[in-house]
Amino acid sequence: MDFYTVLWREMIVLKRTFYKFLASRLVSPLLYLVAFGWGLGRGIRINGGNYMEFVVPGIIALSAMNTSFNAIGISLNISRLYHKTIEEYLIAPLSAGSFVLGNVLAGTVRGLIASLIILGLAFLFGAKLVLNHWFFLVIILTCFIFASLGVVAAMTINSHEDMSNFSTFVILPMSFLSGTFFLPEYLPQGVAYLIKALPLTHASYALRALAQGQGLLPISLAVLGAYAVLLFIAAVVVVKKVR
Amino acid sequence: MIKLQQLSKHYGNIVAVAGLNLHIKRGEIFGLLGPNGAGKTTTIRMLTMLTWPTDGKALINGYDVTRDLNKVKQEIGVVPQQMNLDQELTARENLELHGRLYKQPTAERQKRIEELLDYVELQERADDLVSKFSGGMKRRLMIARALMHNPKVLFLDEPTVGLDPHTRRKIWDLIRRMNNEGMTVLLTTHYIEEAEILCHRVGIMDRGQLIALDTPEKLKRKVGEVAVESFEDTETGYKLFSSREKALDYAGQVKSNVLIRDTNLEDVFIELTGRKVGD
């Protein structure tokens, strides 16, 4: 239960800054929905459905990724390099596993809230989506993966500048290419294969299939599960190594 | 209470701490002095398990810092050099976080928080965010935080750096009070007078080694109790003598202005390290 202490701290801060967090999480999905759903995508139909319904699961996936990665990655990186608040946890009798789990769950909560905001917006924009418990499980898994990646990045990258470089070279391309706004099948085959190995691709595929009522994609779920386990282990290892 | 045996830390080819042997007794205030880069902070980081020793051993209350991690963690309180309070939390929440991290039961934790807020006189500001605190208040809160889990040894790395004279004295009083109540204290400092006023014994470190270890009085006696400062052109000359007569003799030969005074720990320090503190 030690991880709860870490989560407890994060939730106090989230409560205290909730409206700021809410507002900041509203802006970019709103812009995506307006630009790609309403503006650009108005006349487009993909696989017989309208583009809005195609793009919303993609936006949820990328927003879950961005929110959970940034929430943990950036704040932990600053805490390690600048505020040194992380030493308070390293000195305490707290295992690396509990420390990582607390942080990852905190990132997951934030990512989940961001995803719910988009769902709310999407309904206002008139998108029709099928929601069930699998849909939310995939969102949670996506958040878990990228919060874990956030821990790995925060603990291994040694400057804020390189942290933002990591976002630019890894997170940003994934946001656009991983089946979020269009299907990677339209790209050259080699590139498409590469993209299909990425976790976010499976997140948006799985969410889209569920939202369109096609049921669960077991392979995508398995891939996401594998990424979650691997990245969580990697996060624990890098925290242990920090001494 | 604290035993170091050949404790060493190497960073590649750089030797930060070179085989330190030291025994700090229960109830002692021990000061570790030395120029920048002498290895003081590295020593503290090894004792507080933030850095792994390359070689040697360190025992705190009989527990090995590389083996009995959780035992050692309960024994020690740490006030690091850098302000590392959680700025997004209030003073009370900072203490509560610490208590929770050390698995204190709720009732005990709440009681201890109130006690410590009184102890460091922060009761009135307990529910303000730490980011609004002054430097002295932050430092006091850091000490309170380190005391939350009732440690037996307190590590203070440069406890009064950047504080005004009033606040500094307040921190000194706090350290003395804790020590009177039985706490063993290991502090590092750049301020020689701080070590002279507070510490029962001091160790002077230079280039990763302990070059002197004694009470401030004995160290002063060792290098000479009387100091003569002579002011020539651009630089001040210092010479230390074992008696007033010898000092006067020397002063008579110097043509420029001289000042004869008692030796202080800074003279010892400079005599032994050959550099001014802060070089």
Image (cartoon, coloured by chain):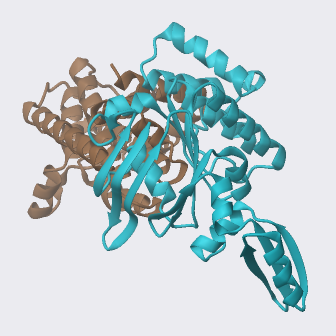
Q: Position of residue A35 (x, y in %)?
A: 45, 48
User: Can you tell which quarter of the image residue B66 is in?
Assistant: top left
Image point (74%, 21%), residue name = B123
Residue A53 is at least partly visible in this image: no
Nearest the viewer among A64 and B20 is B20
Q: Name the residue at the front extreme.
A: B245
Image point (67%, 51%), residue name = B195
User: Can you tell which quarter of the image residue B79 is in?
Assistant: top right
Name above or below for residue B119 compared with residue B198: above
Q: Does residue B170 appear to the left or right of A112 in the view shown?
A: right
Q: Position of residue B78 (x, y in %)?
A: 52, 39
- The N terminus of chain B sits in image quarter: top left
Nearest the viewer among B55 and B81 is B55
User: Can you tell which quarter of the image residue A131 is in?
Assistant: top left
Chain B as rendered: colour: cyan
Nearest the viewer among B104 and A238 is B104
Q: Position of residue B89 (x, y in %)?
A: 60, 31
Q: Position of residue B74 (x, y in %)?
A: 42, 27
Q: Does residue B128 appear to the left or right of B76 in the view shown?
A: right
Nearest the viewer among A97 and B202 is B202
Image point (77%, 69%), residue name = B243
Q: How many marks?
A: 0
- The C terminus of chain B sits in image quarter: bottom right
Chain A as rendered: colour: brown
Name above or below for residue B67 compared with residue B220: above
Residue A139 is at least partly visible in this image: yes
